[in-house]
Every structure is written in structure tokens, then in C-alpha cells.
Image (spheres, grey):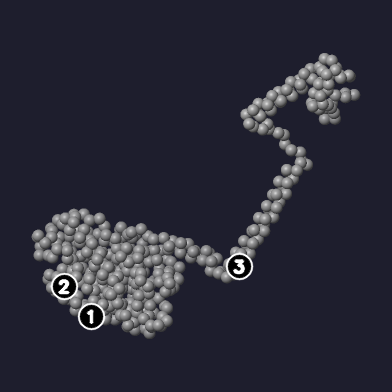
Amino acid sequence: MDMGRGNDNGPAVSDEEWARFLAEAEAGAGGAPKEPSARAREVTARLRREDEQRARAARKGRAPSAGPPGWRTGPARQENQGRGRGRRRLRAGLAVTAIAALALVALRPELVIDRITGKAAQEDRAGRPLPAETARPTAAPSAMHPDRPTLKEPFKGSPAAQWADGAAGIEVPEAQAVGGMTKEQVADALAKAKQFLVAANLDPATLRGERPAAALALLEPKPEDQLARLERSLTAPTKENDPLAFFTRADPAGVKPAGEVVKVRGRMWTEPGRDPGQARVRVDYTFVHPFVKAKPGADQVERTIVRRQMTFSVADPRKWEATPGKLWIETTDRDVANSACGVHDGFVHPVFDEDEPTGPTPSGTPVDPYDRSTGLDTGRQEGCGTLSRS
């Protein structure tokens, strides 16, 4: 029987024990072989190499690598116990979160409904302002969730929620010399065109039905018939001479603005005039006005959408009889959506649910008042039309 190996064919005596045996033999202990065998020399050399490696590692400030701990050692068991407690804490945290989520859904189920219907995504998009319009759009704005406007959110459910506020929506392009007019003359004409639009459609006094003095002051006084006609439309409006062709006005006895913001979107550009020494400023803007009844406790908000296309003309006073810095209105066209049909008193009349039907009954294919992809002269419906949204 071979006493040098165990049952797994490994050495029955460990390396440490053999090294100790050799040390005792060298010291003269009895029973030890006086001449070490080849195996003894091999083990002694390997242990010496390991001692040298540990010494070098200590000099370099590194701890020598150690073998894996036994399966019964403490650190591994403690680590496993820690992971178990972590999993239990995670499960408890998830349970609390789930309970809180269920409670929130019970209190506000619209949060889940909005996500399912896509309303939340629409509101996210509605919160992002649109870049300035530099060319005519190719399509109408996307459909919005049909939310009703409120006093707090008068543009809720409207594409105008992404439009600019007031005068910020009327951006003046960079001026260039055109039609024989200098760059400076064109820049002045562009600035005056914006001033007119602001005074005619955004000024609180104008919206209250007062005389739009600031807008009138920008117009060419020669010949006098232009200003005279505008003055007559303000004092004695008719279907043929309606101030709404130029100004946005509401009867303060019936309605008032729902807040201080009017949403605006559109563009302006220049082109040569009819003759040398003349230039045109073309504008195409949509104004969204929220209104509420002018009576205590009124809270229903209705929006009136006014789109205006106008052409202002300016001329070089050195070549033409013209007043420097004044505008001549060459053409004007407008579309007023959500205003009572058949009323020509010079005011817009937004329709509310409580109002009794008056005038012609709306009919025809519904029109989207927010669609700016076509001009007002394209496919216009005669009479009192219907709206797809307001």
C-alpha cells in the first residue's frame, strides 16, 4: 500500500508539514532523512518563491492575493444575509409605491385616461412654443383634445396654446432695399406695419370699442377719403363700411377679454410696389381672442378667431406725393370666426351656449379657423358657415 498518497491521489502530507519536517531534519531531529529527496527540494523551492513574491508585494505596498474563503467563513455568510435584507427592503419599497400609485389613480383617474387617449402627449406638445412662421404652412394644425377653455386656461384645447403672446407674434423680417426704396425706408415701413397691427388688434382700448387713435395716426392723410371713410365706419358702421375690416372691437356692454393675452401667428414680407419708388408690405396674421360675458359670475370662455390679410403701400416722397413714415392701405381682407352672423354694428359677437340663436343659421362644410395653409381668397364659403373648432 502506497502511504504517500491519499484517496484522491494527492500527497498524504501537506507541503507545510513536509517543509517543517525538512527543517527539523536540518536541525538534527531524529528519524528524518539526511539527504532531501527530489520532491523535498521541489517543495522547498516553491515555498521559497512564494515567500519572495509576498516580500516583493509588501515592498510595493500591495497585499498578496489570497485564496477564496471557505464556504463556512463569516464574510460570505454576512454578505448573503445583507443581500437578503436588501431584497426585503426593495420588496417593501415597491409595495409602498404600488399602494401610493393606486391611491393616486383612485383620486385622479384622468391621469391614466389621459395617457391612454394621448391627451397628455398633446398637452406636452402644446406647452412647447412654435418657431416663427416664415412661409405659408402646408396643412392645418393637428387635431387637439377637445378641452373647453377656462378663465385660467383660455386657450386650452386650441392650437393657439403654442402660439406667441400678443405683439411677440408679429415678427418683423430683416429689411432689404426693394422697389427703388432704400433699406432704411423699407425697415421703417415694416416697423409701422407692425405698429398698426398691434394698435388695431391688440390695444386694450381698441378691443373695448374705443376709437383706435394710434392706428389711425399711422395712415397716409393724403388723399383724405381713406381716413374719412374709416372714421365713418367707426361712428356709423354698415355691412359695406364695417370697421371690422381693419380693427378688432367688442362691445364692452356684452363681453370682455378673458385675460390679458391674445395669441398671434403669421408673417409679413415685402415686395416691389406698383411703380418704381414704391414698396409693399404684405401681412397675414391670425389673432385668437378669448372672451367672457361682461356680467358678474360669468365663467364660460369662448374664442373668436380673426385672420387678416392686408397690403400696406409706401412711396418715396422724392418721387411721389407721399407723407414720410405713413402707410397707405392698398388692400384688406379678413375672416372672423365665432361671431354672430348678420350683425353689422362694428363689433365681434362671440356666441355662448346661453345665447338665443339670431340671424342666419350656419350651414355648409365645417371650416377650421386655425388653418393657415390657404389664402382667404381660396375656397371661401359665402354666407354664414360652420366651424370645425374654435
Q: Earlier in the sequence, mark 3 or mark 2?
A: 3
Which residue carries the number 1 mark?
237
Foreground residue among 97 and 21: 21
> Farthest residue toward the top?
35
Where does the image place residue 18, in percent across and percent down from the top left?
81, 24
Q: Is residue 8 above or below residue 232?
A: above
Q: Please state which amino acid type lies under the numbered disc 1.
A: Pro
Indicate the quadrant where residue 153 lies. bottom left
Which residue carries the number 3 mark?
103
Q: Earlier in the sequence, mark 3 or mark 1?
A: 3
As helix, strand or loop, the secondary structure at mark 2 comes to: helix
Q: Please state which amino acid type lies under the numbered disc 3.
A: Ala
Foreground residue among 70 and 200: 70
Q: Cα distance, mark 3 to mark 1? A: 60 Å
**Crowd class of label 2 (few under 14; some 14 to 19; many from 20; radius 10 Å):** some
Indicate the quadrant where residue 224 lies. bottom left
- Residue at the (14%, 62%) spot, across then down: 315
- Residue at the (41%, 63%) spot, across then down: 142
Where does the image place residue 202, in percent across and percent down from the top left?
30, 70
The numbered dot on residue 226 is: 2
